[in-house]
Image (cartoon, grey):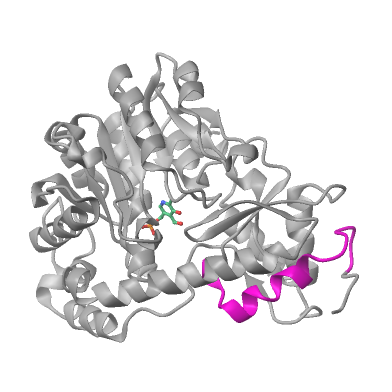
Amino acid sequence: MTVSSPLVRAIGAPPIPAARAWAARYRGQAGPAIDLTQAVPGYPPHPDLLAKLAEAAGTRAGASYGDIFGDEALRAALAGDLSRRYGAAFSAEQVSITAGCNLAFGMAMTAIAEPGAAVMLPAPWYFNHEMALRMQGVGVVPLPCRAEVGFVPDVEEAARLITPAVRAIVLVTPNNPTGAVYSPEVIAAFAKLCRARGLWLVLDETYRDFLPGEAAPHSLFSDPDWGEYVVHLYSFSKAYCVPGHRVGAIACGGALREQLAKVLDTMQICPPRAAQTALTWAVEGLRDWREGNKAIMAGRAAAFARVMAGVNDWQVDALGGYFAYLRLPEGAPDAMAAAEILASERGLMGLPGPFFGPGQERHIRLAFANAEEAAIALVPERLAGGLGGALESGD
Ligand SMILES: Cc1ncc(COP(=O)(O)O)c(C=O)c1O
């Protein structure tokens, strides 16, 4: 008897619990465990935000259904934030609030791609994107990215790989898993390609708040017609440190939003109410705090790059946002075995490249965002020595 969808059965188990199981075998022999698996900001949410969440959760409004597209006040607040960040004019009507960015992606894909269609994902990819597509019966066309160019996807190669089934190209910048930050020129080139070929460019900018500087990440929104070919995805999880409250967003044009309404209504009815109320305040209320966190993350990225500069055999092939993507030393076992050894014997937990798609056997992702600089300083000694087995150096 078939008890589950073959589409879902064909997908691998959720990767992060698998990596945590390796870590559960660690006995502390190399010092305190350093968990660089999941992309969570390693600092607490702001206490005022927690107070507002508690207050909103205790109201009748917080317990009731809300607008399908999300509360008008939060949509307007995010539209204001987007306008400021991208130097373009957004309206609340272009914004839909979702129960997290993962669901934003899944729902956007349901609106865009029918079963049997395909979506192009630069590889390595964010594993939940691939999983979401495959379980909807949508094919994945990999766009291989190369270490030599910092894992930035190549637009000409993308053009060559487009098949008649492809409905969209997805770019994640700053990238998960590599950390690569795509330049405005690269993003513009992909937008031009998508527009010319009648595809959607889906931009997941979950980590945009951690980009250094004030400059807009790209200029796509200065085109008054952007809504005809661009879909922007956002997450409140990282910037506001509230991943458990599940709030994300989709910004898109009116025609797609009309179709999206059916998907939002069916899959989430409305996004979480209390969190929306608290975040409406936080968009402006925590602007300075967010700037401070950006500086903390930049400090961690710099600290990671600094300590890794002294490590000769491991190569940092890309770094940015929350992540560094490391190439294993020559002669080391492949990434699955290496990540297991690092987690279970050295208390350094990262995710092996094969979790992020084909051709990643020689890479490991470390989410340095999770760790304070003192813990980052310990990474080189955990990486030192061969990965044949037991910890070889105790220094
Ligand atoms: C690229 C990317 N998109 C989406 C998400 C999920 O965000 P959310 O917690 O809003 O669902 C993550 C989380 O790691 C991510 O890295």
Query: Is 196 a magenta residue?
Result: no
Q: Image check: 131 left or right of 393?
A: left
Q: Name the residue at 19% across, 55% down.
A: 270
Q: Is residue 255 visible?
A: yes
- Left/right placement of residue 362 relative to residue 392 reads left
User: Where 193 sits versus 70, above or below?
Assistant: above
Q: Which residues are magenta?
A: 369-390
Total numbered circles: 0
Q: Quadrant of the N terminus?
A: top right
Q: Residue at x 40, y 17 (%)?
A: 165
Q: Position of residue 213 (x, y in %)?
A: 36, 61
Q: Is residue 36 visible?
A: no
**Residue 367 occupies quadrant:** bottom right
Q: Quadrant of ligand 1?
A: bottom left
Residue 381 spot, x, y in % from top left: 78, 72
Q: Which picture quadrant has residue 63? A: bottom left
In this picture, is 21 found above or below 351? below
Front in this rendered view, residue 165 or 182: 182
The x, y position of residue 81, in whole percent, is 19, 60
Which image quarter holds the C terminus?
bottom right
Of residues 29 and 217, the one drawn nearer to the viewer in this rendering: 217
Please tell me whether residue 318 is drawn above or below residue 30 in the rendered image: above
For residue 373: magenta? yes
Percent position of residue 3, x then y: 51, 39
As displayed, is residue 235 above or below residue 33?
A: above
Indicate left or right for 1 with 392 as reference: left
Residue that appears at 36% across and 50% down: 205
